[in-house]
Amino acid sequence: MSNSKTILCGDSFTLYQFTSSKRLCCWADLTPGSNESAGKKKSVKITRAGVYLKPALVQVAHAAVKCFDQPYYKIKYERIMKRRSKKRAIIAIARMIMTAVYHMFQTGETFNPVDLPKIDMSPEMRENQKKTAVAEAVRFLKRQGLYLIHFLKSVPSLKNRY
């Protein structure tokens, strides 16, 4: 409860004074900097600005990553962690949460991530969706006058369909 108070009722800011979620995340210092001069990369650490907000968001991000009931942020965290470090992944999740909070306050809508169906999709459904997308692309190319006979012969699942 104290983290939600910190995020929503900050002493030095209100969510409405920022023109976009990017500006809010930048003020809260959830955006990495890129400082390069003469081809040499300098520090890309995330600096310390939103003294109260950033630790609260990081704590919320840690809790969201460990939640089993709603695996949205957990799956996002695991994907980012493969490419980056754990700390950078937590900062990315904190930024996602801050962006979601900002947009919920601006629009009055509830939390509804756009890519949630892609994350919760079973492998069978994902494969079926991929086959459907390929079939639609082939139909589109046929309508445009392009025939991919050699390509269709090389793909076993599409061999007898077209």
Image (cartoon, rainbow, N blue to C red):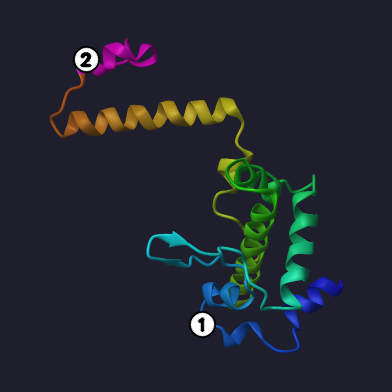
Q: Give the residues in magenta.
A: 149-162
Badge number at residue 113? none
Is residue 104 covered in magenta? no
Left or right, 132 with respect to 120, comes to: left
Amino acid type of the residue that numbered disc 1 sits on in the rendered structure = Thr
User: Which residue, as the protein is rendered here, is positioned at the far right?
Assistant: 1
Name the residue that disc number 1 marks: 19
Residue 17, above or below 25: below
Amino acid type of the residue that numbered disc 2 sits on in the rendered structure = His
Q: Is most of the magenta stretch helix, strand or loop?
A: helix
Label 2: state its secondary structure: helix
Left or right, 87 with respect to 151, comes to: right
The percent position of residue 83, horizontal first and vertical second, equals 57, 43
Label 1: state its secondary structure: loop
Name the residue that disc number 2 marks: 150
From the viewer's side, name the closer residue of 120 and 19: 19
| Quadrant of the drawing holding the C terminus | top left
